[in-house]
Image (cartoon, rainbow, N blue to C red):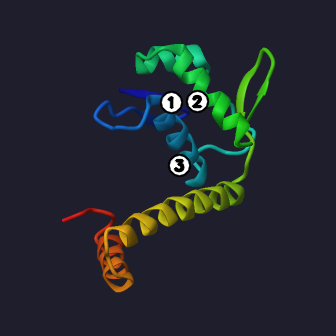
Amino acid sequence: MKGECRDVMITIDYKDRRPIYQQLMDKIEELAMQGLIQPDEQLPSVRSLAVELAINPNTISRAYGELEKKGITYSVAGKGSFLAAGRDAMLAAGRQQIRRELARLIERAAGCGISKDDFLADAARIYDEGGVLK
């Protein structure tokens, strides 16, 4: 399903294990990091995005609320939600999130007996293949 933020598509993958609100948050952050949504640019209204994606408006509201808590967006009463952070701030936040996820993966790998060399070799191969596991 698709919704437009300017000419940018927001999609939902119902096969994804992440909650829909999390998918929305991740997509908005990704679009901001790519520079496709600019600081102070208005995000689609809760109602319009809910209609376009055919999902509950409360789900959109939750995603927008969580983004605001993280400092990525801000809201203006009666106007809507806007992107707060610039691209550099978004990249820094994204990098920090990736580091947290990587730390959890390293902990799991070590717990499964995967050596540092094997972990790094697997990571390098998957990275070189564009993140696709073959």
| 118 relative to 93, above or below | below
Mark 2 to mark 1 CA distance (whole Å): 5 Å
| 33 relative to 125, above or below | above
Q: Quadrant of the N terminus?
A: top left
Mark 2 to mark 3 CA distance (whole Å): 14 Å
**Circle 1: residue type:** Tyr
Report the side of 122 relative to 69 (left or right).
left
Q: Which mark is residue 63?
A: 2
**Circle 3: residue type:** Glu
Indicate which label's residue lies in the foreground, 3 or 1. 1
Q: Residue at x 76, y 19 (%)?
A: 79
Q: What secondary structure is marked by label 2?
A: helix
When asked about the image quadrant of residue 105, the answer is: bottom left
Q: Position of residue 83 (x, y in %)?
A: 70, 39
Q: Residue at x 36, y 71 (%)?
A: 127
Which residue in the protein does label 3 denote?
30
Q: Nearer the viewer, residue 126 or 53?
A: 126
| 1 relative to 71, above or below | above
Residue 37 in sight in this render:
yes
Q: Which mark is residue 21?
A: 1
